[in-house]
Image (tube, rainbow, N blue to C red):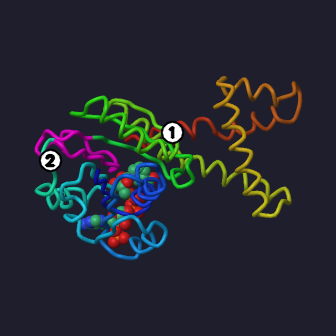
């Protein structure tokens, strides 16, 4: 198979790296295309078996899978450029471009290509990503293949187009929102006299540990809060102070604002 990634920025670069390190790279050709050379050269230095090019048509020509990872406003010109090079109805189009509906890909690519909208998040670069996937004109086998491509970057979740934007907010924008909690916790640590680097590391491990408890125990967050909160103790005072300052409301409003 020929698998091509177009756009080697944050997302495309993470996808290309994960692909290059996966089993798929062993028996398949990986092409990476980007407008400028620097990111391509860096990828080539790490993964010499990958083909790099600044010519999108070279990457797309007769590709079995094309992964589009450019900014939304670059999508149409890139699609117009590569559409004549793909195999109509056969080439699988995978797009990580946010908020572009399937109907638009049908207009760009003859209306019959198996098409996937994938919303990864930046934790993909450390193998802890979430890739939310919706499929159109695709068989079960094609969907399973796409899922296996993204499995190497963390976990995958299949959904329908109706829900993909909500997942994008929760998992993709959510990374930025979670960082704000982390930054605030770090600042609190510094205010209590802990050096900045140590406060950042410890707040991050605390957050990771808290998340892992939910993932492994599968309980409601409030059950884990109960385990830390002594009646009449200090932690409950902290939680009350946070809610007085509007914490839960701010988090919910932040998520919902990302959906608008
Ligand atoms: N970042 C996230 O968390 C995230 C999450 C989910 C989805 N997404 C989606 O992923 C897409 C890419 O975002 P990003 O954060 O990875 O952006 P980015 O870092 O700016 O990467 C975009 C890449 O596209 C390249 N490019 C621009 N024009 C091109 C062209 N005509 N042909 C080939 N390559 C071209 C750029 O090349 P240069 O090196 O020359 O600039 C750059 O490397 C967006 O549509 C976004 O909606 C991002």
Is the residue under label 2 in contact with that under label 1 (CB below 8 Å)?
Answer: no
Query: In the rendered structure, does residue 167 fall within the stretch colored magenta?
Result: no
Disc assigned to residue 74:
none
Q: Give 107 or 84, whichever is nearer the viewer.
A: 84
Taking the spot 57% from the left edge, 40% from the top edge, the residue there is: 251
Q: Is residue 239 left or right of residue 58?
A: right
Q: Residue furthest front?
A: 27
Disc 1 to disc 2, how far (Cα)? 28 Å
Which residue is denoted by mark 1 in the rendering? Answer: 155
> What residue does disc 2 label?
109
Is the C terminus in the top left, top right, bottom left or bottom right quadrant?
A: top left
Left/right placement of residue 260 relative to residue 47 reads: left
Q: Read off the magenta span.
A: 90-115
Q: Residues within 10 Å of mark 2 (few under 14, many from 20)?
A: many
The foreground one among 12 and 61 is 61
Q: Position of residue 147 (x, y in %)?
A: 40, 38
Question: Mark 2: which secondary structure?
Answer: loop
**How far across and down, in percent of the image, does residue 234 sit?**
87, 36
Give the quadrant of residue 233: top right
């Amino acid at each position: 198979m020929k698998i091509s990634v177009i756009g080697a920025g944050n997302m495309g670069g993470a996808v290309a790296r994960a692909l290059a390190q996966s089993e798929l790279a062993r028996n398949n050709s990986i092409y990476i295309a980007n407008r400028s050379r620097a990111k391509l050269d860096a990828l080539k230095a790490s993964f010499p078996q990958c083909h790099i090019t600044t010519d999108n048509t070279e990457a797309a020509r007769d590709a079995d899978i094309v992964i589009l990872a450019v900014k939304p406003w670059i999508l149409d010109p890139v699609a117009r450029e590569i559409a004549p090079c793909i195999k109509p109805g056969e080439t699988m189009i995978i797009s990580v471009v946010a908020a572009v509906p399937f109907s638009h890909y049908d207009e760009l690519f003859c209306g019959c290509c198996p098409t996937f909208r994938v919303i990864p998040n930046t934790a993909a670069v450390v193998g802890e990503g979430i890739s939310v996937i919706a499929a159109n004109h695709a068989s079960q086998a094609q969907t399973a293949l796409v899922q296996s491509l993204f499995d190497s970057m963390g976990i995958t979740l299949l959904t329908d187009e109706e829900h993909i934007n909500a997942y994008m907010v929760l998992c993709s924008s959510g990374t930025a929102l979670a960082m704000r909690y982390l930054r605030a916790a770090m600042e609190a640590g510094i205010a209590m006299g802990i050096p900045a680097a140590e406060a950042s590391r410890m707040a991050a491990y605390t957050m990771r540990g808290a998340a892992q408890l939910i993932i492994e125990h599968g309980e409601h967050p409030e059950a884990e809060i109960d385990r830390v909160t002594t009646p009449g103790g200090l932690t409950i005072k902290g939680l009350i102070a946070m809610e007085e300052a509007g914490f839960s409301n701010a988090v919910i409003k932040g998520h919902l604002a990302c959906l608008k």
